[in-house]
Image: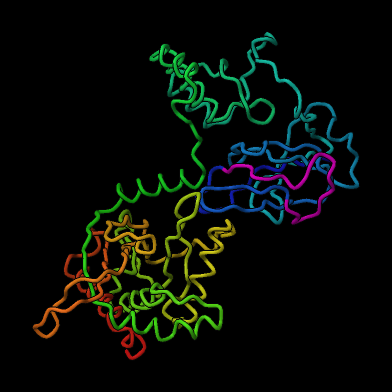
Amino acid sequence: MRYIFKFPDIGEGLTEGIVIEWYVDKGTAVKVGQPLVKMETDKVVTDIPSPREGVIAARYGKVGETVHVGETLVEIEIAGEAGAEAKAPETEMVEETGAGVVGTIEVASNNAYLPASDEGREVKPAAEKGSARKVLATPVARAMARDMNIDINLVKGTGPAGRVMKSDIQSFHATAASAKDSPALSVTAQAAGELVEIKPMSQMRKSIAKNMLRSKQSTAHMTLFEEPEVSALIAARAKYREEYKKEDINLTYLPFVIKAVAAALKRHRDLNAEMDFEKGNIIYKNYYNIGIAVSTPDGLVVPVIRNADQLSIRELSRAVAEIAVKARDRKLTLDDMKDGTFTITNYGALGGWYGVPVINYPQAGIIGIGRISQKPVVVNGEIKVGNVMPLSLSVDHRLIDGAEATEFLLDVAAGIADPLSLIMR
């Protein structure tokens, strides 16, 4: 008896993934929970486990290929069942939800059959068979072809069993447009070599683009700026830096900022909330999970430090180091990314000064910190050389008024300027 295991819906609004690595091949025996394939989604890289014990009869999707939720990943021959059952006379398929993975699994019963795999075969266009059967294609590809006025039967599919994918429609349209609009340029480019390079967007870049656009379209951005003098912060870090090194902890300024932000959020709960505009509600969070924007070779991710208000500077330092390593090694899980209530982005670590950060929707605010630089400051009526840390606060103006945002930012700035106050309040 053979199961069809489809790419499952693993939550967080994911709709597709890219095959990074296959752990199994045709003929591989697998157990329940054993990883089958590593997939890159738009948020994380994750292993997809087997929902059943058996032998891999076929697998779909090459390394680098995009697979949509609901499309077949593998066929599993169930141990102890007659393989002939999978090739019985044609009848209707039935479905069963498999254990261990949230997804759809189709199972052939005594009154159902599963056709043999088309993997490795050349799939002929429907026109050659003289029938009106539709070409294999994903629903997304069909909708896109319809919108672009493309005859999907003319598109060569690169998916499992020759299935036409969204990327095939996009490539077909791009090729047709290029040939129509710039035939001379196309010939020149081929003759001259690579005048341009076309590289498919990664799942992460797609997610970043989608989230940034959604944030700008769904919120009313307002940004405020402040420059606290942080000589006391510099002294505190210098005092404890060597002590922390003995515990393999790199003490940076970021844990102090996290501490100051968490403390300020407790006094300004509008900044730790989100707006449910459709229902007319404001959702106030009574927990303080701080997202930290981390730059990776593939793009920006925002893992979360949970209950940051309850952690010491030492514990925050460890947490920051751990999530940074996991992000750059592509080992973040969905749990690492969920339930953030406010975000910090540190472009100062890369030498940046000021910026206008984009809110991590549906959160209400994000604060950016720039590099510390020396500037003249006035202390007790005298001009002195000071150390200034630029702060940029972007908030959702639908929820947060200018006065509240200003008070919050000044509160954060005061905590950073006087780090001792963070443990004395």
Residue 32 part of the magenta-drawn span: yes
Task: Check the picture and name the quadrant holding the N terminus.
Answer: top right
Residue found 16% across the figure and 76% down from its top: 377
Residue found 19% across the figure and 70% down from its top: 406
* Position in image of residue 313 (x %, y %): 44, 81
Residue, far left: 381
**What are the residue bounds of the magenta stretch?**
17-35
Q: Left or right of 346: which side holds 201? A: right
Q: Left or right of 91: which side holds 287? A: left
Q: Nearer the viewer, residue 391 or 164?
A: 391
* Position in image of residue 191 (x %, y %): 49, 16
| Residue 248 picture quarter | bottom right
Task: Check the picture and name the quadrant holding the C terminus.
Answer: bottom left
Against 337, residue 169 (above or below) is: above
Residue 63 part of the magenta-drawn span: no
Residue found 43% across the figure and 22% down from its top: 148
